[in-house]
Amino acid sequence: MYLYVIFTLILSSRRAAIARNAKVGRMFTAISVYTIIVWTMYPIVWALGSGTQRISVNTEIIIFAVVCILLER
């Protein structure tokens, strides 16, 4: 599902936004890139925490909380 959302954000939805207006296209691109970066942080944090235990549980929880706050912006 993650890859489908990324594909949609990068290709079809971006084209539709650019076709509407150049300013809308730039804004959509900026928001899409931000969303992709934040969503990509989830599996990275999981891999460092639960996956490989390279970071402590407390650190993992704090980073997940920060990522959630960034996503809400």
Image (cartoon, rainbow, N blue to C red):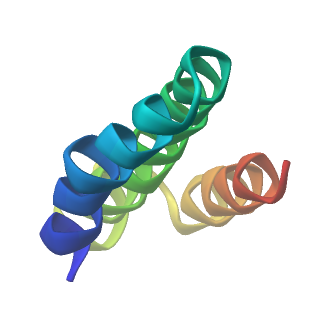
Coordinates of residue 55 in the picture (x, y in percent): 41, 49
Q: Is residue 63 left or right of residue 5?
A: right
Check the image and report above or below for 57 versus 7: below
* Residue placed furthest toward the bottom: 1
Coordinates of residue 45 in the picture (x, y in percent): 39, 54
**Callout count:** 0
Coordinates of residue 68 in the picture (x, y in percent): 71, 62
- Residue ID at (85%, 48%): 73
Q: Nearer the viewer, residue 60 or 22?
A: 22
Quarter placement of the N terminus:
bottom left
Q: Is residue 32 left or right of residue 16?
A: right
Coordinates of residue 17 in the picture (x, y in percent): 49, 41
Q: Is residue 43 visible?
A: yes
Q: Is residue 47 left or right of residue 42?
A: left
Task: Identify the image quadrant of residue 36.
Answer: top left
- Residue ID at (34%, 65%): 46
